[in-house]
Image (spheres, rainbow, N blue to C red):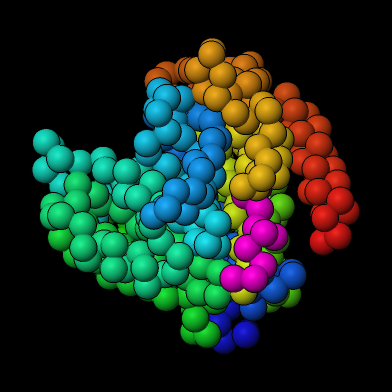
Amino acid sequence: MKRYIFLFCLVAISFVTTMACTSAIVSGKLTRDGRPILWKNRDTSHLVNYVASKQATDSTHAYVALYNSDDTDAREAWIGYNDAGFAIMNTASYNLRHPSDDWKDREGFIMSEALARCATVDDFRQLLQSLPKPLGVEANFGVIDATGGGGFFETDDYDFTFYPLDEGNPIIIRTNYSVSGGDGGLGQVRYVNACALLAPHIAKADISPELLTDNLSRSFYYSPDCTDKSTAATVVDKDFIPRHSTSASVAIEGVNSPDSVGDMVMWTLMGYPPCGVTQPVTLRNIPADLLPDTNGGCKASRDAQTLKDGVFFRRRGTWRIKMPELQRISNENKSKSLINYHKFRTANNK
């Protein structure tokens, strides 16, 4: 374990650039309760989102997923899981072969197709191989299944490179570049942020969904100078895990057996994470304020957006944060999140 942590951190400190969506898949060997986790801190221009479910048919799985507010037909899933125990998410990559301008940004459609059709990691591999080319994507697809397996598929229009979750790699982090790609990409600073914040929990093998949604996604640790900016008065919004463009933080708590799929939970923190509250989503139940409504998106997303608008301001072309006010909001909402975690686990004997 010590050797793994050393190599993990050594890779982390070799990157030094700018911004990114942040994601991770974690083997049960490193989690508090032995279950795998798939996590995505979503950065996007679509800041208002919602959660919806799809019913099973004779040929498709039932599933639940996160969608953009303008996707009223719920056609493009951005993270979700299905009744076979398969879960998927993505981060955009910027150093693979770029798709053509007339056929791109198809990641959400592919993830919806995967949730409807796939039960295992290998099913998703076969789906990527069978879909018509070009795919219209440049992405890192992260997946886990009900056997405890998982991995990242770094995927362009015509091909992919697979990085499995295994003994040698019990945790894999991705931002907005691909390991199999060339120079460039985005998100290297955030990658290092996540590595630094997770390192002590890797050592203890106590990673949990709430560590991801309510610690990392609320953190203002800045790895270039190894400081926590949460105590400053005013902070420029740059290279933190939560960004002005973050629309949600979602951690899907997987299982290790198909017989336990009913135990899966999609812990969903809607909106800019320091201004939101994490809630449990299952195939059987979606909290009312996460469901789509006639105002566009969902109430939880809009409520977090309103709070965020009150603590951000622009100066000299950059977003800045009124940190004391934001920390007050974040601390209050983190307490609410942890109560939700406790209540759900108590009610479900977890």
Q: Main secondary structure of the magenta part?
A: helix
Rendering quarter of residue 14: bottom left
* Residue drawn where x is 42% and y is 75% of the image: 164
Q: Quadrant of the N terminus?
A: bottom right
State the image coordinates of residue 72 (x, y, percent, origin top left).
42, 25
* Residue drawn where x is 39% and y is 54% of the image: 59
Specify the segment rendered in magenta: 258-267
Name the one closer to the observer, 188 or 120.
120
Residue 239 sits above or below residue 124 on the image: above
State the image coordinates of residue 151 (x, y, percent, origin top left).
43, 69
Q: Quadrant of the C terminus?
A: bottom right
Q: Is residue 23 left or right of residue 206?
A: left
Residue 294 shows in this picture: yes
* Residue drawn where x is 31% and y is 68% of the image: 125
Q: Is residue 26 left or right of residue 135?
A: right
The answer to whether residue 263 is magenta is: yes
State the image coordinates of residue 266 (x, y, percent, origin top left).
62, 49
Rendering quarter of residue 51: top right
Rendering quarter of residue 78: top left
The answer to whether residue 147 is magenta is: no
Residue projecting furthest to the front: 58
Residue 249 sits above or below residue 158 on the image: above
